[in-house]
Amino acid sequence: MTTTTDRPAQQFNVVGTRPIRHDGVDKVLGRAQYGADLKLPGLIHGAVLRSPHAHAVIKRVDAAKAAAAHGVFAVITGEDMPVSASELLDMGEEVTDLRWMSERIMARGKAVYKGHPVAAVAAVDQNAALEALKLIEVDYEPLPAVISLEDAMAPGAVVIHDDLVGDHLGEKARGTNVAEHTRIEFGDPDAAFEQAAHVLERTYTISRAHQGYIEPHSATAFWSPDGKLAVWTTTQAPFGVRSNLAQVLKLPVSAVKVTPMEIGGGFGGKIQLYLEPLAAVLSKKAARPVKMVMDRKSVFDATGPGPGGQVTVKMGVDANGAIVAATADIRYMAGAYPGSSISAASVGVFACYKVPNLRIDAYDVVINMSKTAAYRAPGTPQAAFASESLVSELCERIGMSPMDFHLLNAAEEGDRRPDGPIFPRVGNKACMEAIRDSAHFQSALQREGPDGKLRGRGMASGFWNGIGNRSSVTINVNDDGVVSLVEGNPDIGGTRATIAMQAAEILGLPAEDVHPAVVDTDAIGYNDLTAGSRTTYASGQAAIEAARLVVEEMKKRMALVWETDPENVEFENGVFRNKVAPDQRFAFKQAAGKLGQTGGPVAKTGSVNVRGSGGGSFAAHLVDVEVDPETGKTQVIRYTAAQDAGKAVHPSYVEGQFQGGAAQGVGWALNEEYYTDEDGVMLNSSFLDYRMPTALDLPMLDTIIVETPNANHPFGVRGIGETSIVPPAPAVANAIADAIGARLYQTPMNPARVMEALAAKRNGANGR
Amino acid sequence: MPITLRAHTGGEARLEVPGATLRALVRNLDERCPGVRERLVHPDDPDRLMPGLAAVVDGEPTNMGLLTPLGEDSEVHFLPAIAGGA
Amino acid sequence: MTQQEAPVRKITVACDVNGYPAEFLAAPHQSLLEALREAMGLTGTKEGCNDGNCGACTVALDGRIVDSCLVLAAEADGKRVDTIEGMAPPNGLHPLQQAFLEEAALQCGICTPGFLVAAKALLEREPEPDEHRIRLWLAGNLCRCTGYDKIVRAVQRASSEMSKPAPAGGA
């Protein structure tokens, strides 16, 4: 655990320390209330009937028997859900179409993915609800399922949505599964390839991988007779759920109150609506609060993994190894409705490099599987698997070390990002240098492991831009000088602490004296979602703003006490002082006791709309693997992740983000995929068969926090939650190639594929 | 300009257009390249960008839509917003 | 809607939960996990998969750790069940709970109760396990947030705290 910084440190008292998180005790005691833990008076339970087919016309749904069954309060089908016309919605970090969202939540006339809700029941208990589902009669007419890029893009392909109007480079297209084809281009890559000393082109296939949060989705709703809808849900986006529910259910936004419960992981997968509107409509019918908890199989079948797809990348370099041109062709399978983060992929595929001539084509393709969702740095790990694998193979061919290549070609301040904007000061090269100087990089790799196992080392870099956007934080000063901090971002990984610490820094208080609370959408100003690496960065700025307003107000109050002008009151290190009477001083706590008689309570809200991320966060990862040539199994034996945090607010949770993203990336690299039959039915929809890394699959994950300050944040903080999932898969691929002398071009690089690559190598095939 | 709008700009990827705000810039752009305004501006709210479109001014996305002030040498990119999420 | 007699007869289950006697009615199909959460209100034990693959519902049954989603509630009759709610001493934390906080070994926290119950059972059997042993023991508990590094360190830290001789006069 190392931290490198390149500047004379701004002096901090709280930021950069490692206090115990405020919500920690509740969580280790088992007292924290997650979505499924909620109990309400009169609560009944809902369950969802889901399509067993990936693509089928729903000819008839008869729920009469279910409605009459023992203990059943309400049954709903697609007919009970309001119909929505096409309308683009701003989701905070992404946009989506209201109509697709509405149809995805409950099928109407046609099921377009396995697990598509067809009906839902509310009953006295979970068991009664599940039994009632069995009484619902549905006639399906199965249609051919479109489950691959080849199927979806072939001429004469089965078209999933007759009325989908694709946007193909600005031209409207009908009768297609390609929702969007975009292109970014500058310079003349084709001419530059002609002039290049070396050119390499490769195609990579990346699996669909699920976010894999351990807590399944859950939602509870009560639609009151007065028209108010209250929802308790496990979400990254309470305000997003509020506005999306209002849109889907045709309610004014202010009629909906969303209370975020503790959330058991999200990683981008708990932004979209799933159960909330169903619970709401069931509640309206049943006149009772309805709780719904998704089972794990449905989480896999019917919620969004990150998209799989195919990425072809081509790169040309001059005789010195400097990039002269690069192109990419990115094709992602969005699932049953459009939207697979192809624009982020287009930014991320070459973001780490200076590329003078560039073209990136990207295709958003609809298939008959559940709609994909954001998954940590959406779209980018897939693209980076291609570009960073290509770079490593290119380096092999030109006899250049990947470290030298990265340092030579790294995009830095003033360089243009692939989509146009110019980078401000960023830590790309600094991360690489941190890896170069690490004990791991400096150590010699023992190339032979025990029992003939083969070892290799690989590295890769990664980028994620992140967002800023809207946040509100309210600080209330209590008589005893402890403050409560009210915020609206669900805390998934320690953000109560990191936001509170930034307020504490301004207020001169220890972190423990700021008591954070995440509250419902009626109790705090608007907050964008907990996503986009924005929470510590943007809501932290709202907290800083609120704390500054508190200080200003308390200066006025102390001026009253000291009978002086507010300008004469200064505040430093938690102490108010009268500049003209230096013996007049109050610590924050003493001052707080004087608020009652100087005008009443001090409660201040900081509201911000933070522009951009300040250049994003770069990372570089280094990994050693051990491959068993007998079985093809790969074990990660050493790992180091370096990433730019700008300024680490709580270093332990920064390290935790680096480590968690690395682990997810390793899972994607080695094991994780949706394994389906030809009808699009997922065959491995359990944690037994969808194999995420366990404690035994990973070594200790070393971290290096690089601190290249962000000019957009008063403390230099960068959002860091997402980048860490970008480099692992290509780093592992490069390490496997180093170990076995053959390349894999597909995730997951599971034992079967490693054995295939070894066999191909024995048979004299080189690469593919 | 994104490729999707270059039909309106006669194929031009980069244009120099005056304007003290993004709104003024779009107005002036539309005079030069008729039809581009209705691709850039929200049909119901003249102060907002078209849903699905983001503007990046001097390297950072705008958070004031078309009310964003521009400097003398500001660089503006119109980009597709990140789609997803449904 | 009709409110008839429930079609299945429930079974009376009497057991010891966290050192206190507990009695509840369980349907024959009901899991111990469901009984703990629904009948007894002990929601600290979490459901992640309901098929024995994530470990979020880990409890100790007569001292042996089990996935409570795979145990029928009726099987707990006459046995002792220890859950996360019984782990801390009065007015304090178990050294493992403290170590999880100090080491930042939780992010979202949903897997934490299962890890704590499992790790406690390990340290009761083997007070000083090495890293590999800890990883092997905890391999039945999935965590998606941390990459396990800090969890393993927390268990190591608790192990060394618990191995120290108790301070004079300490509890």
Image: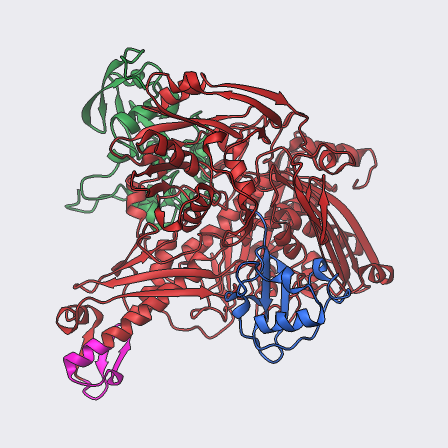
Chain colours: A red, B blue, C green
Q: Residue at x 58, y 36 (%)?
A: A672
Say if the magenta span includes residue A568. yes
Q: Which residue is drawn at 51% across and 43% down?
A: A699
- Image-quadrant location for residue A186: bottom right
Q: Considering only vertical position in the picture, is C126 above or below C107? A: above
- Judging depth in this view, the residue of A405 and A211 nearest the camera is A211
- Tell me where residue B23 appears, x and y as whole percent: 57, 70
- Judging depth in this view, the residue of A163 and A456 nearest the camera is A163
Q: Is residue A373 left or right of residue A315?
A: left
- Judging depth in this view, the residue of A188 and C130 nearest the camera is A188
Magenta-colored span? A556-582
- Tell me where residue B75 appears, x and y as whole percent: 63, 72
- Image-quadrant location for residue A602: bottom left
- Tell me where residue C125 appears, x and y as whole percent: 33, 30
Q: Residue at x 79, y 50 (%)?
A: A201
Q: Considering only vertical position in the picture, is C124 above or below A597? A: above
Furthest residue in direction right, as rendered: A194
* Residue B70, visible in the rendered structure: yes
Say if the magenta span includes residue A756. no
Q: Residue at x 64, y 50 (%)?
A: A342
- Tell me where residue A216 appears, x and y as whole percent: 43, 35
